[in-house]
Each structure stands twice: as structure tokens, then as C-alpha cells.
Image (tube, rainbow, N blue to C red):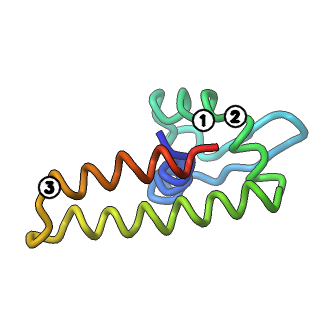
Amino acid sequence: MSIARIFKELNVLGIRIVAHGDRIRYSPRSQMTPDLADRIVAHRAEVLAVLNGDPEALSALAVEAIWQATLDELKSDPTIPPEVAEALQTVVCREVKP
């Protein structure tokens, strides 16, 4: 699961997320899903780096978000064969991850 997708899902659900030292707080708690909470825990270090404004983490998040948006467009384009979009997804995910 990409960190960009986590932040996108938080935004879609209207969840505000902040760092308090080495802890992650979010609200409203009623919007948080168990799956999303688990993914945040699994990517805790990356989430904290972004929330704390780490330039490398923010840059990586921006690159990942741009690629994800591009891949989402390709997947919805009926002229692009699904297997091509999936192959690109696989390559990009492998290249974007640290």
C-alpha cells in the first residue's frame, strides 16, 4: 500500500491527521476504518516523516502521488489495455518505494 493512497483516503474520508511527537492522532475517530488504521500503523515511520515535514518524505510523497494519479488515469482510459496499466503499476510501485 502506498503512502500516497493512505493520505488520499484520509482526505476522502475527511480525517485530519497530525503528529504529536512520535504519536499519530486523527479525528474524527468515527471515520477511521480498521483497515486504514492498520495501514497507518504499518507505515508509521513514513507517515510521521510526512507529518513532520521531512523534505525527502514530502518529495517522495509528491512523486508517488503524481505517478498514482497518472496510473489511475491510464486505468480508466479504455484505449489502454488493462495489462499495460497493470504492468506500469508494478514497475512504478517497485521504483517509487525506498
The amino acid marked with disc number 2 is Arg
Q: In this view, does 61 lie above or below 93?
A: below
Instruction: Name the residue nearer the viewer: 54 or 19.
Output: 54
Of the residues under marks 2 and 3, which one precedes in the sequence?
Answer: 2
**Residue 58 falls left or right of residue 92:** right
Of the residues under marks 3 and 1, which one precedes in the sequence?
Answer: 1
The amino acid marked with disc number 3 is Pro
Residue 76 position in % (x across, y down): 19, 66
CA gap, disc 3 to disc 1? 29 Å
Could you tell me if the residues under marks 2 and 1 are in contact, i.e. CB atoms within 8 Å? yes
Pointer 3: what residue?
A: 82
Pointer 2: what residue?
A: 44
Quarter assignment of residue 90 = top left
The amino acid marked with disc number 1 is Ile
Q: Nearer the viewer, mark 2 or mark 3?
A: 3
**Residue 41 falls left or right of residue 71:** right
Q: Nearer the viewer, mark 3 or mark 1?
A: 3
Quarter assignment of residue 68 = bottom left
**Residue 13 falls left or right of residue 90:** right
Pointer 1: what residue?
A: 40
Disc 2 crowd, CA 10 A, few/some/many (<14, 14-19, 20+): some
